[in-house]
Image (cartoon, rainbow, N blue to C red):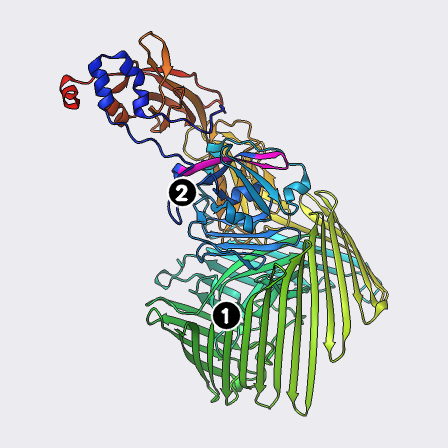
């Protein structure tokens, strides 16, 4: 690649004609002087971004980035004022190896910063930016997105990231001064990246979208967990397994699960066929977004039934990541054996789970705050793995646009799976009415832009058919005094009635939700926090506050909740909770208090419990976690302490140590140690445990692996975990010599392309192919294509970001045709009166190819114009017609360029131009 000046000197057309005037007569010189010169090109350094939401291409800057005297890149894409430029966040954070995900299509930035894993969320749609719960004010134009990246003004970005930017506008350089240890610094193995700036910029402006169509049938993919062990308890040799399978079947996504008990006997299973469309393109005019049959869940209603599982069907037209402030959501996902999971909502630890329920985690009735809610599911594996998924849920007041409608329906046989074993799981959460028909439906319709009608109906099974009940409800969603307002009334077939009023909004800068409900006639409401759903209610009141507390220059997210419930039998319960999180000294802290007061039936009890947890990624080497549980009422008592430490010895070997200590029984401590081997096609863990309380020891081995069909080799192959619970990608890179986008003819495979975005880096082999697993099953996923190690750099590559929609057991075929290209340097010259040739600047030159491709360039101060990434073909060298006609400029001789696409440079072209004198008529007019 030829070295090109990053700052081109553009001369005006008048200056370009100076030599011509010296070689012509006085009349021609007068005519040339009379020719009005076009205004000089605006300096890219002086032009601001083209308004909010746009980037002005004329203000493009290519900056070098230095960190600790190491040049990370010579071509960081930026726009705007060089004193305070808009920096490409995705490109910058990738250079720094930071855990930041930039989603230009969703106009959102999500990340975890530092050893304390502080959260970073930037949402352009709402104009919101938060770092560790601290609001960062954004002015119009501070954050701008295009199709390839999101750009943030440097002065604003340094308030989001742990660093300062020292910008040198003269040298077009940025020096990073970190305020804490960055991942790239901890490794100290990074080399300077020097890429072709223009090629890099062009690739970032586009995303290659690959389709993952639903198929009639595809070969299934599997994720398997096999565990064996030995212990000195009753079950001497435990054996457990989890099997997850995913595939396409009948143009839907099939998901299956089978889990065993400790004796290796199958204990639970579930099967689901599901099809989703983020855009709502299912069932024609119904515009459904999700359809599922098999083991599914019914929707919850504002009054009455909650979401419940069983075998049946479900359909929804509701946007997948939207709800209203008065609803609570249920979060479910896959949880393999030996894993535990934590739920964070807006940086506050809400709950945790370490025992799978039917192979998955469940967080039920999770309350949210109004506006954007950042939900993080953090999963910790027995081998020291740590994975994190982030979901953004937009919580509004439930008001729809006029004429807009949403619908939800679920019909199931309650708490019954499609496949039931003789020894079913004992984790059934709700046995009342198990096996009976349960149905629930929600309909919302926008009457006006400020008023929405809600209607609901449900059929709820009882212990016997005579106790089955039907429920009907009506409601309104609107806004009163600036507060979102919800009014609902319900009636059941046994004469029970219910009415509720809810209001939500900002009160002194704090998100506030108030809801009160009255019940009569034995009406049963299953949606309350901590409510005994088998007992009729009289009334329930809820009050929640969510906000941030500033303390010693730190921002601490806090959540305060209170619930008062009265049952028909006279018993009253008062629940209160306080939770918060913060960071300090590189540690993420979380703590909370839970209060419960029960009165009635001749007794009163008070309990107050608390917890404190901390986690850090010390030095990006040790992953440390600890938790302390304690009781304050009825007696002050420390209950338990747990500490775990994980350390990667190498890329393939890791260690884990853990200790648990019941603080009310100092002899009951337990110890854990494990060694983890990350093999090429599996993860193997060898672990040992000892419980001093009952003097039980356990030794175990667990193997996690995947099994997927690789269409490139036409057979199944063993892979790392992921293909059964998420999608896979068959990536095929080749030199597309005939330009048809298909690998055929004289096309050649391209090895050494690096793919990032899955659980591990993958590289294309000698056949140009790579089979990538572990890309998850979210609505969208991305792979980053690295071309730095490709031997032939004279190629025109598709965008280096590949976007697709994976699902369990699916595989997406990504064809990556790289067109052979070449380069040529064209020198436009003008002959002086003394016969010498000089370069002509600011001349616009075109290469017109016989392949239909046309390239444009402008000569620099020496008359040279560099053309890069030219597809194979024969090109004519021509002057841009409009400029040539205006300046009466033409080439003395025709010139052609042949691009062979062999990685070499085409011979330089030296073209001489001439200027025609003005006609006498035009000369008189100018005089």
Q: Secondary structure at mark 2?
A: loop
Q: From the viewer's perspective, is residue 231 above or below residue 620?
A: below
Give the image location of residue 623, x and y in percent.
71, 52
Q: With respect to residue 869, does 223 lie above or below?
A: below
Q: Is residue 913 magenta?
A: no
Count residues near mark 2 (Cα–Cα under 10 Å), then give few for <14, some for 14-19, many for 20+. some
Decide if residue 581 is on the left or right side of residue 542: right
Count neighbours of disc 1 (C-alpha within 10 A) and say few if under 14, some if 14 to 19, many if 20 or more: few
Q: Which mark is residue 239?
A: none
Q: Residue under label 2, please give it.
A: 48
Residue 450 in picture, x, y percent from top left: 36, 71
Residue of label 1: 508
Q: Secondary structure at mark 1?
A: loop
Q: Residue at x 59, y 79 (%)?
A: 531
| Left or right of residue 466, residue 883 in this image | left
Point out the image quarter for the C terminus. Answer: top left
Residue 269: percent from left, percent from top: 61, 64
Give residue 184's position: percent from left, percent from top. Answer: 64, 41
Residue segment shown in magenta: 59-72
Between 81 and 822, the residue placed more toward the observer is 81
Q: Which of the 4 image quadrants contains residue 542?
A: bottom right
In this rendering, the answer to whether 29 lies above or below 117 is above
Residue 907 placement: quadrant: top left
* Tally of numbered tags: 2
């Amino acid at each position: 690649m030829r070295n090109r000046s990053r700052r081109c000197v553009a001369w005006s057309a008048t200056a370009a004609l100076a030599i011509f005037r010296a070689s012509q007569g006085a009349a021609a010189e007068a005519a040339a002087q009379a020719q009005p010169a076009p205004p000089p090109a605006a300096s890219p350094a002086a032009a601001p971004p083209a308004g909010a939401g746009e980037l002005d291409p004329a203000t493009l800057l290519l900056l070098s980035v230095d960190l600790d005297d190491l040049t990370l890149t010579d071509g960081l894409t930026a726009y705007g004022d060089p004193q305070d430029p808009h920096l490409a966040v995705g490109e910058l954070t990738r250079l720094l190896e930071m855990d930041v995900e930039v989603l230009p299509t969703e106009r959102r930035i999500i990340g975890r910063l530092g050893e304390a894993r502080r959260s970073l969320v930037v949402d352009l749609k709402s104009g919101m930016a938060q770092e560790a719960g601290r609001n960062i004010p954004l002015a119009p134009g501070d954050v701008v997105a295009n199709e390839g990246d999101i750009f943030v003004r440097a002065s604003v970005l340094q308030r989001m990231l742990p660093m300062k930017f020292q910008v040198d506008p003269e040298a077009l350089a940025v020096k990073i001064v970190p305020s804490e240890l960055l991942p790239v610094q901890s490794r100290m193995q990074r080399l300077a990246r020097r890429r072709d700036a223009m090629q890099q910029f062009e690739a970032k402006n586009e995303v290659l979208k690959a389709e993952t169509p639903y198929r009639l049938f595809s070969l299934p993919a599997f994720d398997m967990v096999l565990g064996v062990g030995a212990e000195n308890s009753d079950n001497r040799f435990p054996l457990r397994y989890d099997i997850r399978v995913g595939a396409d079947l009948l143009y839907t996504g099939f998901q299956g699960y089978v889990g065993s008990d400790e004796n290796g006997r199958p204990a639970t299973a579930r099967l689901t066929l599901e099809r989703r469309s983020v855009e709502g393109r299912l069932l024609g005019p119904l515009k459904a977004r999700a359809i599922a049959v098999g083991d599914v869940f019914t929707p919850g209603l504002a009054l009455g039934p909650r979401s419940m599982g069983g075998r049946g069907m479900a359909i929804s037209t509701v946007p997948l990541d939207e709800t209203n402030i008065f609803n609570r959501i249920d979060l479910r996902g896959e949880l393999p054996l030996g894993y535990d999971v934590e739920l964070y909502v807006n940086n506050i630890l809400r709950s945790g789970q370490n025992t799978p329920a039917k192979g998955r985690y469940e967080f039920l009735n999770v309350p949210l705050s109004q506006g954007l809610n950042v939900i993080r599911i953090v999963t910790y594996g027995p081998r020291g793995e740590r994975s994190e998924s982030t979901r953004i849920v937009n919580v509004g007041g439930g008001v729809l646009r006029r004429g807009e409608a949403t619908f939800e329906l679920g019909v199931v046989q309650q708490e019954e799976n499609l496949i039931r074993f003789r020894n079913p799981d004992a984790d059934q959460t709700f046995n009342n009415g198990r096996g009976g028909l349960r149905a629930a439906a929600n309909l919302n319709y926008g009457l006006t832009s400020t008023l929405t009608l809600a209607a609901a109906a449900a059929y709820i099974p009882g212990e016997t058919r005579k106790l089955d009940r039907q429920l009907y409800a009506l409601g309104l969603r609107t806004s009163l005094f600036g507060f979102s307002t919800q009014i609902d009334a319900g009636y059941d077939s046994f004469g029970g009635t219910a009415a509720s009023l809810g209001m939500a909004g900002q009160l002194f800068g704090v998100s506030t939700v108030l809801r009160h409900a009255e019940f009569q006639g034995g009406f049963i409401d299953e949606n309350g926090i901590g409510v005994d759903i088998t007992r009729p209610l009289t009334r329930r009141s809820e009050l929640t506050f969510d906000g941030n507390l500033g303390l010693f220059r730190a921002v601490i997210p806090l959540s305060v909740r209170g619930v008062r419930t009265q049952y028909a039998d006279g018993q009253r319960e008062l629940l209160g909770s306080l939770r918060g999180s913060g960071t300090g000294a590189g540690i993420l802290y979380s703590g909370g208090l839970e209060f419960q007061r029960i009165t009635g039936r001749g007794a009163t009890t008070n309990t107050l419990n608390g917890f404190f947890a901390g986690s850090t990624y010390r030095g990006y080497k040790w992953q440390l976690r600890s938790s302390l549980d304690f009781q304050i009422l009825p007696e002050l008592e420390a209950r338990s302490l747990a500490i775990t430490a994980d350390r990667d010895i190498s890329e393939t070997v890791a260690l884990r140590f853990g200790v648990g200590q019941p603080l009310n029984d100092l002899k009951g401590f337990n110890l854990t140690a494990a060694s983890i081997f990350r093999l090429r096609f599996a993860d193997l863990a060898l672990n040992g445990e000892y419980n001093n309380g009952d003097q039980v020891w356990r030794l175990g081995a667990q193997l996690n692996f995947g099994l997927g069909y690789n269409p490139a080799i036409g057979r199944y192959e063993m892979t790392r975990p992921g293909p059964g619970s998420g999608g896979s990608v068959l990536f095929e890179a080749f030199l597309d010599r005939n330009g048809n986008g298909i690998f055929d003819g004289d096309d050649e495979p391209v090895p050494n392309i690096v793919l990032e975005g899955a659980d591990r880096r993958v590289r294309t082999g000698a056949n140009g192919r790579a089979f990538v697993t572990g890309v998850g099953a979210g609505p969208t996923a991305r792979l980053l294509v690295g071309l730095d190690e490709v031997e032939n750099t004279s190629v025109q590559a598709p965008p280096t970001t590949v976007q697709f929609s994976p699902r369990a057991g699916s595989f997406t075929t990504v064809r990556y045709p790289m067109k052979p290209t070449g380069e040529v340097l064209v020198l436009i010259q003008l002959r002086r009166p003394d016969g010498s040739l000089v370069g002509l600047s600011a001349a616009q030159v075109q290469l017109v190819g016989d392949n239909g491709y046309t390239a444009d360039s402008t000569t620099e101060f020496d008359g040279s114009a560099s053309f890069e990434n030219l597809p194979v073909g024969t090109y004519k060298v021509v002057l841009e017609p409009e400029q040539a006609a205006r300046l009466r400029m033409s080439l003395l001789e025709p010139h052609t360029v042949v691009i062979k696409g062999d990685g070499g440079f085409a011979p330089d072209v030296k073209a001489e131009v001439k200027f025609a004198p003005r006609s006498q008529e035009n000369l008189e007019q100018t005089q």
